[in-house]
Amino acid sequence: MIVVGTSLSVWMMGTANGSYDLMIDGTTRGWMGHFQVLSGDYAEKPSLYKNIDNPAPLVESMTKTAGVQGVTTRSETGGLLALDNRTVATAVLGVDPVNEASTTTLPENVSDGEWLATKPLEETAEYPMVIGRGIANRLEARVGDILTFVGQAADGSMAADLFSVVGIYDSGSRRADRALVFVRITDAQELLVLGSRVHRIVGTVNDSRALASVMSKLPRPASAEHRLSDWMELNPELWDLIKADRDSSAMILWAVILVVVLGVAITMAMSVFERTRELGVMLALGTSPGRVVSVVLWEVSWLSVVGVGIGIAFGAVCVEYTSIPLPEPVEMGGVVFTHMTGSNTWQWTLFNPMLVIAASLLSGLFPARQAAGLRPVDAIAGRRR
């Protein structure tokens, strides 16, 4: 029972944490980053005029912080994108082609064509653009087509220019693919008359579990209007979803532990009952009640340690090789799942089994006290009080 209960707890929490890791990595490394610097309430109310001027010094300092994987900048706006007589509303993201590739996995989602070129094009050439799969379908656009963008610049003038489709972005998220297009940040700044201003500074860390430690070391923005936020603050919906799922998993886990504890308590109670005469002889020969308690608890300890050890090993192997393909892709928290996978961590592989050992020892106290309270004469005669 201990082996099965421990294996179930390790496998259940390992699979759950694997799903959490997929959701967090898909969101942070795929697009949002682990932390961002924004101007004021830009996250809640985006505006072309809420921006960060001259971000280069802060980006350089953040990049040099221990534990940081990469830092990039983005400029954002909205407008209309047209091809022939077809028009769609879209969000245009100006990104740094080089820094974006070292910070997030955005460039890896280009399924047709290529990512944004880093070298300047000829003056007569159109700006390069990567469009989402949904936008490509709605515009019936392909790589090489010339699109027209119309929006508003930061100086109040009309921002309009021609863009050449160099790639099609396919993240698997229909919402993102129907709304996003990417251009080079220098082109976006020129088009929107932003100068050196950007709307977001986005960074990722090497280990998401060490985010709090890295965040404490990051340099703060010089302006009080700019704020540094982590992904949990920027995406509270995903964080609430993970916490709710963890709470439900914890309830199931406690139910498993309760079953194990009851099993151990019943086993030890029967063990004491079947050895009543043996314990009576020990007490008659001068064994102290405390010694009898220790004998019973040592038995519980070995039963728990051996059972938990086998359970940890079996559960960890199951988690390591857990990869369950889903019948169809599922989108949760903005992340597309094609399969469920497990993730072994010291916290969840060892912490929960330690609870099983502690609970087993506690469950052994009652039969141990019963054994210590036996009267030698009654115990040897096979009678219990």
Image (cartoon, rainbow, N blue to C red):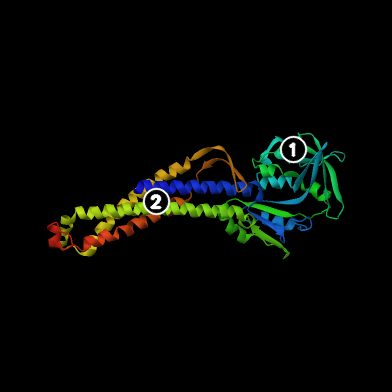
Q: Position of residue 115 (x, y in %)?
A: 72, 39
Q: Position of residue 246 (x, y in %)?
A: 50, 53
Q: Position of residue 238 (x, y in %)?
A: 59, 52
Q: Residue at x 56, y 52 (%)?
A: 241
Residue type, numbered disc 2? Val
Name the quadrant of the C terminus: bottom left
Task: Tell me: 242 left or right of 175.
Answer: left
Residue type, numbered disc 1? Arg
The quarter of the picture where residue 65 lies is bottom right
Q: Is residue 332 above or below residue 144?
A: below
Q: What label sits on residue 138 in the rendered view?
A: 1
Q: Nearer the viewer, residue 160 or 35?
A: 160
Tell which circle, 1 or 2, labels the residue nearer the N-terminal end: 1
Q: Nearer the viewer, residue 222 or 77?
A: 77
Q: How many marks?
A: 2
Q: Residue at x 73, y 51 (%)?
A: 74
Q: CA distance from mark 1 to mark 2?
A: 51 Å
The residue furthest bottom is 224
User: Can residue 284 be seen in the rendering of this structure?
Assistant: no
Q: Secondary structure at mark 1?
A: helix
Q: Residue at x 69, y 42 (%)?
A: 177
Read off the residue under disc 2: 256
Q: Are marks 1 and 2 in contact (CB under 8 Å)?
A: no
